[in-house]
Amino acid sequence: MTEDQAVLQNIGPRLRNFRKALGITLIDLAERTGLTPSTISRLERGHVRPTLEQLLPLARAYSVPLDELVAAPATGDPRVHLRPFRKHGMIFVPLGVKNGGVQAYKVIYPPVSQLSPPKLQRHPGREWFYVLHGAVRLVLTGTQTVLTAGEAAEFDTNAAHWIGNARDDIPAETIAIYGQQGERVHITDI
């Protein structure tokens, strides 16, 4: 017996168990769902296969999701397995599947002594980042700001800017969000 056949075979008893757990009769359930008592009885005894039009009102009556009502098998692992990569001495961990638009990364900056000297960049777009751990130095149009864990910054990337670790003893970690233009400048060589 396949997994699908087992699910279909067990729907009837599951439907009966839901009704019995609520302590309602076939007539009460028929009034709540718009199905006839005989249809509900045939469904519960497995004499007919339920249709979506029958299952939806039953799921509403029992206040359960449709997949729980029929004990649908899990659809797979929802985790996204993405590979970190290193660029310009930093480690970038993608936080989603690349499909255009806004992209998020966890960025790990090595201690300042391991970084290249600041090289200001400009490009179209906006950038936002949040410091998870350590401290980063943001150089933005001639001004320098040090942000520590729990702080965030947002700026127009048309302004000359650079971001790096502000400390020499530990790595700094941020979550950075930017669009396609910003990603191209930060992630690829120019």
Image (cartoon, rainbow, N blue to C red):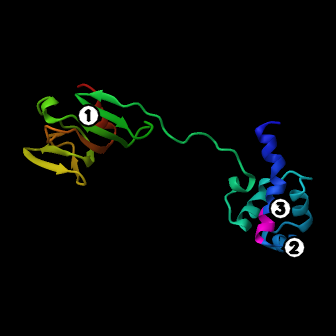
Q: Amino acid at mark 2?
A: Ile
Q: Position of residue 138 (x, y in %)?
A: 15, 44
Q: Nearer the viewer, mark 2 or mark 3?
A: 3
Query: Per the image, is 160 magenta?
Result: no
Q: Amino acid at mark 1?
A: His
At x 79%, y 57%, the residue is: 14
Q: Nearer the viewer, mark 1 or mark 2?
A: 2
Q: Residues within 10 Å of mark 2 (few under 14, many from 20)?
A: some
Q: Amino acid at mark 3?
A: Arg
Q: Position of residue 105 (x, y in %)?
A: 34, 40
Q: Say if 8 sits above or below 89 in the image.
A: below
The answer to whether one can see residue 163 in this image is no
1 or 3: tag closer to the N-terminus: 3
In the picture, the disc for residue 16 is 3
At x 29%, y 31%, the residue is: 187
Q: Nearer the viewer, mark 1 or mark 3?
A: 3
Which element is circle 2 on? helix
1 or 2: tag closer to the N-terminus: 2
Q: Quadrant of the C terminus?
A: top left
Task: Name the one closer to the observer, 14 or 117.
Answer: 14
Residue 171 location, quadrant = top left
Which element is circle 1 on? helix
Position of residue 67 in the picture relative to residue 168 (left or right): right
At x 74%, y 60%, the residue is: 56
Q: Residues within 10 Å of mark 1 (few under 14, many from 20)?
A: some
2 or 3: tag closer to the N-terminus: 3
Q: Which stretch did the figure color magenta?
A: 18-22
Check contact, mark 1 vs mark 3: CB within 8 A.
no
Task: Name the one closer to the observer, 23 or 146.
Answer: 23
**Which residue is under mark 1?**
186
